[in-house]
Amino acid sequence: MISLENRRAVIVEDDEWFAEQLATIMKKQGMNCQTASFADEAIAKIDTRLPDVILLDMLLTGSTGLVLLHELQSHDDLARIPVIVCSATADMLEQPMLAAYGVRRVIDKTTMHPDDVLAAVRSVLA
């Protein structure tokens, strides 16, 4: 099993409570996590220190996760960061289309279990 110790994640989620839940799950595995509520805030944190993985909600306040995915793909270094979409609209998302934007996994946050998040993170970092 891949160790998550000292790995970095940025969680882009406008539901502060849910973002903190995700961060808590990953911090228990030794990950360093930052949260961002908006796409612009996420870019600022990503530019400061590149994360190993990004967890992204698609329905953000002010803009969508697709805006952030476009921005990430426009930079060679940022385009290589694996993205896990964690969304209540997971069943409506077209995974092949998202794969072109660096999305490696899609998790339905309405049915997910904490182990699902850890398994997704481990799988994209393998």
Image (spheres, grey):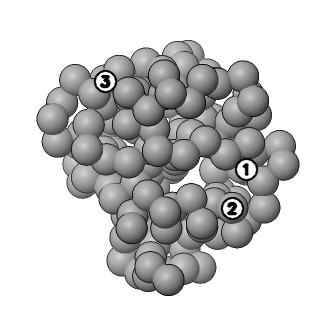
Q: Along the polypeptide, which appears first: circle 1 or circle 3?
A: 1
Residue carrying label 1: 17
Asked which secondary structure carries label 2, the reply is helix
Q: Distance between the residues labelled 1 and 3?
A: 26 Å
Residue 126 percent across, percent down from the top left:
39, 67
Name which residue type carries label 1: Trp
Q: Are marks 2 and 3 in contact (CB under 8 Å)?
A: no
Which residue, given by chain and number where applicable, does mark 2 sit on?
Answer: 116
Report x, y in % for residue 58.
59, 28
Res 60 seen here: no
Earlier in the chain: of badge 1 and badge 2, it is: 1
Rounded to the nearest whole Å, what is the CA distance between mark 2 and mark 3?
Answer: 27 Å
Is 92 situated left or right of 49 in this image?
right
User: In the rendered image of this protein, does residue 18 appear above or below residue 56?
Assistant: below
Secondary structure beneath dot 1 equals helix
Residue 116 % position (x, y) = 69, 61
Residue lying at 84% horizontally and 48% vertically, measured from the top left: 111
Viewer-nearest of labels 1 and 2? 2
User: Foreground: 104 or 40?
Assistant: 104
User: What's the residue at 75%, 30% (across, down)?
Assistant: 91
Estimate the spatial distance between the alpha carbons at disc 1 and disc 2, rounded to whole Å.
Answer: 18 Å
Residue occupied by mark 3: 71
**Label 3: few (<14), some or many (≥20) within 10 Å?**
some
